[in-house]
Amino acid sequence: MRDLCSALALTLAAAVCATPLTTQANAQATDPAKLAEYLKSMPNVAPPAYDEVERLALAANPLGCEDHPHAAGGGGYGGGRGAYLWQRDGRPQILEDYDKKRAFYGCLDWHSGVNSTWMMVSLIKQDPTIEVAPAIRLEFDNHLEKSNIDGEIEYFKNLAGPMADFEKPYGYAWLLKLYGEAKSWDDPEGKRIATVLEPFAKWIDDGYIAYLKSLNYPIRVGLHPNTALDMIFTLDYTNQTKDVATEKVIHDTAIRLFGNDKHCATAAEPVFGDFASPCLVEAALMGRILAPDAYAKWLDTFLPPAYSEDFQLYAKDIDAVHGNNRDTTGTDEEGLPNAHLVGLNYQRAADFVMIANGLPKNDPRVPVYRRMASICAKQGFDKIGTAGYLGTHWIATYALMYENLVNVSPATPPGKIHAAAGAK
């Protein structure tokens, strides 16, 4: 997945393009009769069965990249990226004993190393006897010892200047999500990992809270810095650890930044290289913040009716082929689908599930959104693995997040402790 810093220029440009637009479709109230007719017209598809074969296929991705060190180029966090793994002395030299001083040195970039580790924890929690369980546990032993995490803490605490915000906010959110997954794993290895990660997670949590409080405006791009996307990951952490203080900050920030949003510019999506939908991910976040009735009213004026023209882009297959699949390291896998656009299918699918979960159960939009989630997921599974290493090092993680929502914890996640009666 692309480096956070490589997205800064895109962030500035896309922030202008992402300004909400008012359209006739947005302004209409949803017609239940039209919604029912639209549901009948939707294809009734299903992604592959989520069984052990599928879990093994997904597990192959993190197992194949966790021990694959970042490249020495800028996107691989070499000397130009704060010497996380590579030192510069005439020519790049890898950090001595990096496998004992760093934990997340695999899978192309730091945040992908973290989310791949989360994926392995999540998989073995679901299926402790999965065939690759010994290999997964060996990865934990190799990457998540105290010396590895002590090295991570030392590295982050010593960052300064342009590097001070390294991996903030996306990587921070993923580290917290990983810690929450380990903390809620009822297994001796889970307890060990959580204990080792705890001081790092506490430091990251403090930094993330300060970051949220500093935001005057949200970041709405379809890339790593997206404020709503990162808040969703952090809500997973607060739900699993019962961190009420951080949950309240997320709730208050969501209301402050998104509570009055209307008429999202769905027609502006997707932008080339997106792996998240700015409109859907914001709607998914607010579905986890607001009480169901209040959320239904907020959604009325935020997303257009599902049968409207402005909504149909979500039902269409994403064209991920045009353009080169280029990574910030300079790797050019021309002719392969753009990895981010392939992964966008799974992010859309997960968003639709969360939107449906946030609404009252009898809301007529619920079955439409659930069907849309299945359509998007099917499109993703049809293309998974087609984007080369630039896709396999992270796309399976997003596939698993979708699977977890529909197969492991299909109900609305617990929490909403601070859900307001309505958006202020």
Image: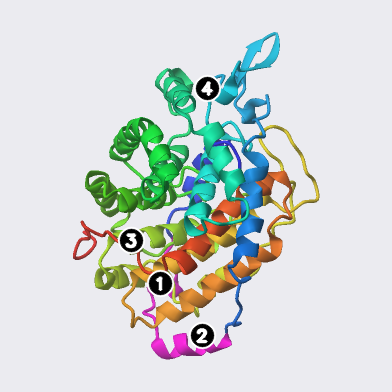
Question: For the residues marked 1 and 2, what is the alpha-carbon distance in whole angstroms?
Answer: 14 Å
Which disc is residue 356 wearing?
1
Q: Which residue is mark 2?
A: 39
Crowd around label 1: few <14 · some 14–19 · many ≥20 (10 Å) = many
Circle 1: element type: helix
Question: For the residues marked 4 and 2, what is the alpha-carbon distance in whole angstroms?
Answer: 53 Å
The quadrant of the image that shows the C terminus is bottom left
Please report the residue visible at 61 percent of the width from the left and 54 percent of the height from the top.
396
**Precedes in sequence: disc 4 or disc 3:** 4
Q: Position of residue 110 (x, y in %)?
A: 55, 34
**Precedes in sequence: disc 1 or disc 2:** 2
Q: Which residue is mark 4?
A: 101
Asked if marks 4 and 3 touch (Cβ < 8 Å), the reply is: no
Question: For the residues marked 4 and 1, what is the alpha-carbon distance in whole angstroms?
Answer: 43 Å
* Foreground: disc 4 or disc 3: 4
Q: Position of residue 12 (x, y in %)?
A: 50, 40
Instruction: Kindly indicate the quadrant of the structure image that contains residue 367.
Output: bottom left
Q: Which residue is mark 3?
A: 288
Q: Position of residue 360 (x, y in %)?
A: 31, 76
* Foreground: disc 3 or disc 2: 3
Please report the residue visible at 40 percent of the width from the left and 85 percent of the height from the top.
31
Does 262 sit above or below residue 334? below
**Precedes in sequence: disc 4 or disc 2:** 2
Please report the residue visible at 39 percent of the width from the left and 78 percent of the height from the top.
28
* Foreground: disc 4 or disc 1: 4
